[in-house]
Amino acid sequence: MSADQTRRREALADLFREARECTLCSLCDSRTQVVFGAGNADADLMFVGEAPGAAEDRQGLPFVGRSGSLLTQMLSGVGISREDVFIANTIKCRPPDNRNPKPEEIESCRPWLFEQIRLIEPKVVATLGNFSTKLLSGEATGITKFHGRPIVKRLGSRVVFLMPLFHPAAALRATGTKELLADDIAKLPPLLSGPAPVLHDE
């Protein structure tokens, strides 16, 4: 492991310890624990979902329920191990009754997510569902029209391929969506093995 990798991993561990004590929004009053994210701290591929659910709130890990199982299965189908990616959410605490995140909650959590992206240094950031896609793309376009089309985006100090994907929870509800998600995930390996993302308008 290089000195830079060691430094970034230590900084990510420090960020996790800091995030565990976060009280920036009212979700700190109802959570069991902060769901910071999990996976390879040097991942080329990072997933950003919506918010922790009940199972995630209990275990402190992202995507441990049915949605996570489907995501793991689909990644395996294209030769990507879940241990090789990093998975986080737009917000780090479970909203009561699994309601949608509020704008002020997303805004409060934004610095945590952007610092994770800076420290992990992914090449591809795949957004899962509308909330993460709209936050990281800066566009109001819904996931139905936006999915499967990578764009080059600057996220903080990091230039990445942003790949909008349907949320696995939506894929569990509809066979057609599941097929679209599988097709879009199949586009990730070529993106990872190809040239680095370059912003041409800077």
Image (spheres, helix red, strand yellow):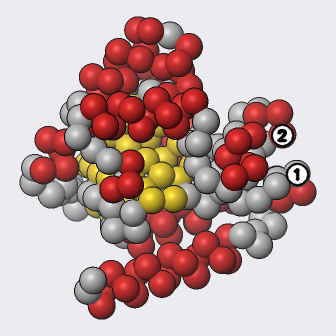
Give the secondary structure at mark 1: loop
Which residue is farthest right? Answer: 29
Q: Position of residue 5 (x, y in %)?
A: 33, 81
- Determine the residue positioned at 70% across, 42% down: 55
Answer few, some or many: residues within 10 Å of disc 2's Cα (few below 14, many 20 plus, some between 14 and 19). Answer: few
Residue 87: x percent and y percent? 48, 52
- Which amino acid, mark 1? Ser
Left or right of 81? Residue 114 is: right
Question: Residue 141, percent across and down?
Answer: 45, 28
Residue in the foreground of this view, choosing between 201 and 157: 157
Is 75 situated above or below 1? above
Please tell me which residue is depicted at 43% across the width and 34% down the height of the picture.
71
Residue that badge 2 annotates: 96
Say which mark, if any, is on residue 86.
Answer: none
Residue 25 left/right relative to 79 = right
- Residue 66, quarter of picture: top right
The Cα–Cα distance between marks 2 and 1, rounded to whole angstroms, is: 7 Å
Disc 2 to disc 1: CB gap under 8 Å: yes
**Is any atom of residue 101 visible in this view?**
no
Q: Is residue 65 above or below residue 145?
A: below
* Residue occupying the point 58% across, 65% down: 111
Which label is found at residue 30? 1
Coordinates of residue 50 in the picture (x, y in percent): 59, 41
Q: In the rendered view of the protein, which quadrant contains the C terminus?
A: bottom left
The answer to whether 21 appears left or right of 56 in the picture is right
Give the residue at the far left of this rendering. Answer: 195
Of the residues shown, which amino acid type is indicated by label 2?
A: Pro
